[in-house]
Amino acid sequence: MALKPPPIGDVVRQLNTLIGESGLRSEADRNARALLQSAMRKLDMVSREEFDAQAEVLTRTRARVEELEQELEALAAQLDAAQPGAAQQDAAQPDAAQLDAAPQTPTE
């Protein structure tokens, strides 16, 4: 039967008891912090500031896309209103997707 390792909290408490309030504690804190920072860099983690900046850019980009979609819809409506006969002609003519989907007869 394999031994189960103690929870990390127990290990930290035991280390704090052994180290006490001596200068070793601050050195151990610095080393642990450096080790964690090194591990974080290997995981391609980003800082909170960089994450927040990218989230802000994404929010602005989404808002701009919505504005452009509304502008496109308005322009399409204006175009349809300016060319009332064109909409009827377009409805009578099949588009490319309909042509691709139509069964083709072999020609010999």
Image (cartoon, rainbow, N blue to C red):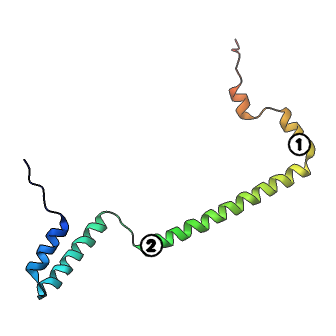
The spot of residue 56 in percent (x, y) is 55, 71
> Counting other residues with Cα less than 10 Å from the Cα at mark 1, is it few (<14), some (14-19), or many (20 or more)?
few
The spot of residue 63 in percent (x, y) is 65, 65
> Counting other residues with Cα less than 10 Å from the Cα at mark 2, is it few (<14), some (14-19), or many (20 or more)?
few
The spot of residue 29 in percent (x, y) is 20, 80
The answer to whether 12 appears left or right of 84 in the picture is left
What's the amino acid at mark 1? Ala
State whether residue 88 is above or below residue 7: above
Image quadrant in which the C terminus is located: top right
Q: In which quarter of the view is residue 65 placed?
A: bottom right
Task: Provide the residue designation for mark 1.
Answer: 86
| Residue drawn at the location 50% of the way across and 69% of the way down | 54
**Label 2, label 1: how far apart the Cα atoms are:** 50 Å
Front-most of 37 and 21?
21
The answer to whether 33 appears left or right of 79 in the picture is left
Classify mark 1: helix, strand or loop: helix
The label shown at residue 52 is none
State whether residue 75 is above or below residue 36: above
Judged by depth in the image, the label closer to the viewer, 2 or 1, is: 2
The answer to whether 18 appears left or right of 48 in the picture is left
Q: In which quarter of the view is residue 18 placed?
A: bottom left
| Residue drawn at the location 29% of the way across and 64% of the way down | 42
Sequence-first disc among 2 and 1: 2
Classify mark 2: helix, strand or loop: helix
| Residue drawn at the location 21% of the way across and 72% of the way down | 35
- Judged from this view, the residue extending furthest toward the top is 108
The answer to whether 76 appears left or right of 84 in the picture is left
Task: Provide the residue designation for mark 2.
Answer: 50
Front-most of 99 and 29?
29
State whether residue 56 is above or below residue 72: below
What's the amino acid at mark 2? Glu
Do tag 2 and tag 1 residues touch (Cβ < 8 Å)?
Answer: no
